[in-house]
Amino acid sequence: MHTEVSCDLCALDPMCSILEYGANEEKIPEGVLLRCRPVSRGETIFRKDDPFRSVFAVKSGSFKTYVPKPDRGDQVVGFHLVGELIGSEGLSGELYPFTARALEESSVCELRLNRLAESGYELETIQKGIIQLLSSEVTFNHELISSLVHQSADQRIAGFLLSLSQRLLRHGMQQKSIRLSMSRSDIGSYLGLASETVSRILTKLQKSGFIHLQHKNLEILDATALAQLADI
Amino acid sequence: MHTEVSCDLCALDPMCSILEYGANEEKIPEGVLLRCRPVSRGETIFRKDDPFRSVFAVKSGSFKTYVPKPDRGDQVVGFHLVGELIGSEGLSGELYPFTARALEESSVCELRLNRLAESGYELETIQKGIIQLLSSEVTFNHELISSLVHQSADQRIAGFLLSLSQRLLRHGMQQKSIRLSMSRSDIGSYLGLASETVSRILTKLQKSGFIHLQHKNLEILDATALAQLADI
DNA sequence: CGTCTTATTGAATTGTCTCAACATGCGTGG
DNA sequence: CCACGCATGTTGAGACAATTCAATAAGACG
């Protein structure tokens, strides 16, 4: 098992704080917050069109979310690292709009939002938390859109690697070597590139001395150079 | 001045309904909902990094939202048609993340959310409306991301035209001929294409008999063919 | 240890961009 | 109201980036 994110650095923390989890554990109704369920590699925590129940926080490991496409390969819509949320998009509708699958041995906390509503908690407080979650989702997607569409393959990969590193850092996972748990095809699908292109560019970045890559272990050697690549 | 959207088909309607606007007009605090301000072509209703105050609904005409880029051309991030909202992305932060500019003679309703908070209205009810707005924003962006990145230029244009038509239809603007109020460059910037490519593909679609285009007047002749193009 | 999946690398093809010339429409001022 | 000038749109040719197809290499997993 990999390192867990500490609670105060987890994206679910605002909600947990609202629930005063920890301080007054007895106040939380039974079965609203489920802590640290292990999920094995390849397992799904929900599938597309399952009825929406919970928002999950990645406690350790990582996940991909994707829309299954029977004919062409699945379409990856996001990666979820340690400390990040999965499923907040389901808030908008009745159903999960995609499938979430563990990329490695992982563990999650589960917040059962449907139970929360009937739990006697102040609706106003809960809503404030939800607005918070949705807001950051909107912001993130917005940046993604305006960047992805206009960037070359090099820029997308550089930006992707930086974003991984920054997101891990934000949640306290500061490590020289990042584990690239997703496949080249997954990255390609997410960034709108062929998996061969991903491969080619990764080796190119390595030859340029910006990164060091061995198997699935990534080390960012020159973040400045990557940033320069991604921005222009 | 063009046709106005009727209130019950406007995206702001959920909020207006919550405020019981119309029924009990006197209940709404002064200056919270401003109705139908005219906006002339080229005018902005807010600019990037202005402090967030209001969400706007397009009552007539159309707008583009964009991030000004001094060096390269501005980056268009959205078009807002009759009946749609502008500025809900500002909810997530303190500032508007982009500029909103009228593409033609238009008019807007303005909902001053900051005043609303101090207005004595039940916070719970207001929050419910906000969650509604944010949710649909998230859903829309999500579909946009997963489609745009993987599509060819033809597909993007076809999808774009269909989306315009569907969005106008949704808000009661059913007309055989759609007014393409934005420039080819704007479309290109939004879809991540060169303006020349947009032009070329539009004439191609016309030669194929899928659309009829003259100046800025668009008529969709074969929506089925367009949809088939966009999906594959 | 062998098989099956995943990754890398090469060569040819396709699509989109860039640069450039030309056409058209629009708004302005005479 | 017309004519002019500038912005916007169209079209063509060459360059380049990314894809596809294909063959090989390397890991992962049972």
Image: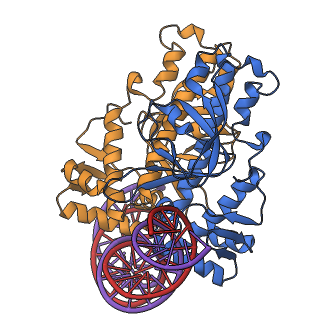
Chain colours: A orange, B blue, C red, D purple
Q: The N terminus of chain A is located in which quarter?
A: top left
In this image, A114 relative to A1: left or right?
Answer: right
- Residue B185 position (above or below residue A125): below
Q: Position of residue B6 (x, y in %)?
A: 78, 43
Q: Hey, which quadrant is residue B7 in on the image?
A: top right
- Residue D22 position (above or below residue B48): below
**Total numbered labels:** 0
In this image, A220 relative to B154: left or right?
Answer: left
In this image, B219 relative to A104: left or right?
Answer: right
Residue at 82%, 25% in the rendered image: B23
Q: Hey, which quadrant is residue B139 in on the image?
A: top right
Q: Position of residue B145 (x, y in %)?
A: 53, 54
Q: Position of residue A197 (x, y in %)?
A: 37, 68
The residue lying toward the viewer, choosing from A162 and C27, is C27
Residue at 66%, 28% in the rendered image: B33
Residue at 59%, 15% in the rendered image: B118
Residue A63 in view in this figure: no
Residue at 45%, 29% in the rendered image: B94
Q: The C terminus of chain A is located in which quarter?
A: bottom left
- Residue B157 position (above or below residue A161): below
Residue B43 in view in this figure: yes
The residue lying toward the viewer, choosing from B149 and A115, is B149
